Image (spheres, grey):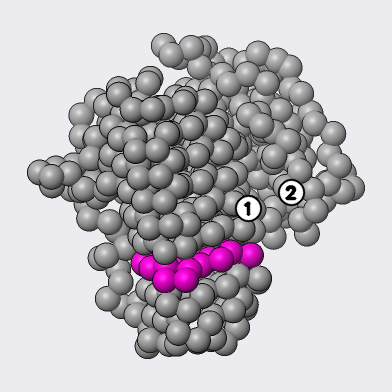
Amino acid sequence: MLESPIEAKMNTQKKPMQSGAGKTKTAPKTKEANGNTSAIANKTGPKPNAIAGLPTYVILAAGRGRRLWPVGEAMPKCMIRVLGKPILEWTLDSLHQNASKIVIVVGYKKEMITGHFKDKPYAGKIRFVEQREQKGTGHALLQAESEVKGPFVTVNGDSFAEGAMFELIHHHIQNNKDAHFAIAQKVGDARPFGLFEIQNRTLKSIREKPAEKTAGLVGLGNYYLPQSFFALLQKIKPSPRGEYEITDALNAFAASEKLAVHEFTGYRSEMTYFWDHLDINIHVLVTWMEDARSGTIENGAVVEGKLHLGKGSIIKAGSRIEGPVYIGENCLIGPNAFIRSGSVIENNCHVGTSEIKNSVVMNGANVPHFSYIGDSVLCDNVNLGAGTMIANLRFDNGPIVVHFKDQGKVDSGRRKLGAAIGSGTKVGVNCSINCGVLIGHECKIFPGSKVTHNLDNDTEFKGD
């Protein structure tokens, strides 16, 4: 069972207490299975041309993220934000310099992806193709076939990795452009992944989602492959769950060709559940975020530790910030707000006389009066009435269990975990929300309600 991860990292992150305005610093860098590709017109710049010596990168970004509901319903999974920036943008910022061309396979709410990246400095390298039906990773990769004219690298657009992983990929390609490989990472429990069977540092097979807890090297979705790999994808059959799996083609490739395995030992995380979203934000807060203050800190406000404060944001007198904390642009914090470590507050938010800890408060959300938000995610434009309390701890200190429609009960493995509340939901005054509860989009929760179970989208809830 885990305490909130921020608590284990904070002893080395403290900075001297400061009062009033701080110095401003630069923000941190940071067909069916055999065809029917649907290319989306690339309006992001001139048609990409291959740059000699660099491969094409194919990014699979069509997923919806059902287990991330309600967070993953309002936007494609790859557009969920970390410190206010979509995870796909973190990925592209890390790899674009080492790519001749970037093919992004889009699907669910594709316009959010194409619109966001059309003005980026690397937009001229990007080509979008569409996966019209969600038929598996192999099917998604096939949609990029017409855009690939040589060796290519695959990337899962809905996972998060530090830039060192893409440097590792580039390093091995530059060492030997003809040596194909897979990137792997050692885990203590391979059940959610594809477990690599390896001999002499070469992949022999992938055992998808082993039934028993097994430690070992697992695939991360990052493969350097020849163009001929698409011919293997054309031959695969649907899996028992009716999807075309890239794993089947990789096993066929490994049976006849050498596929080296290189281990990555840095930070990488899947974003499967809403608590993974919390963890990734906390990791970036602690390890990468720099102190950068462009907003206003009134006299009488106290800031301790690292703070990113965006333009137009105000921290009013009587408020206390215990970093690392990220606050975006045009936010009003306080008076008398208490923002504890591990908190991310995006743009255009209002947090009044309330306490927030280890949580993500997305764009336009409001926590104005006398509320407690711990280990939770509030999606865009959520409004909490005065006195809203989100529980994040069971009386018996047991792990928080979360209920999903399609998956049943999932043990989060956490002693502290709050709730996830979908975009546009309004909560009346003096409401309490149990730990591990999922609340859909555009719900209305009437004053004085106790929410002890999940609520579907558009629910009007007056209590049980």
Q: Is residue 270 visible?
A: no
Mark 2 closeness class: few <14, some 14–19, many ≥20 residues within 10 Å: some
Checking the image for residue 117, the label placed there is 2
- Nearer-the-camera pick, 76 or 237: 76
* Distance in Å between CA atoms under marks 1 and 2: 8 Å
**Image quarter of residue 109:** top right
Q: Is residue 245 above or below residue 179?
A: above
Q: Is residue 140 left or right of residue 114?
A: left
- Nearer-the-camera pick, 19 or 263: 19
Q: Is residue 18 above or below residue 1?
A: below
Q: Position of residue 353 (x, y in %)?
A: 42, 64
How many circles with numbers are drawn on the protein? Answer: 2
Q: Residue at x 47, y 54 (%)?
A: 367
Q: Which one is earlier in the sequence, the residue at label 1 or at label 2?
A: 1
Residue that mark 1 sits on: 89
Q: Residue at x 42, y 71 (%)?
A: 336
**Type of amino acid under label 2:** Phe
Secondary structure beneath dot 1 equals helix
Q: Position of residue 2 (x, y in %)?
A: 22, 52
State which region is magenta.
324-340
Q: Are marks 1 and 2 in contact (CB under 8 Å)?
A: yes
Checking the image for residue 229, the label placed there is none
**Image quarter of residue 231:** top right
Secondary structure beneath dot 2 equals helix
Q: Farthest left residue?
A: 396
**Type of amino acid under label 1:** Glu
Q: Residue at x 56, y 66 (%)?
A: 332
Q: Is residue 123 left or right of residue 156?
A: right
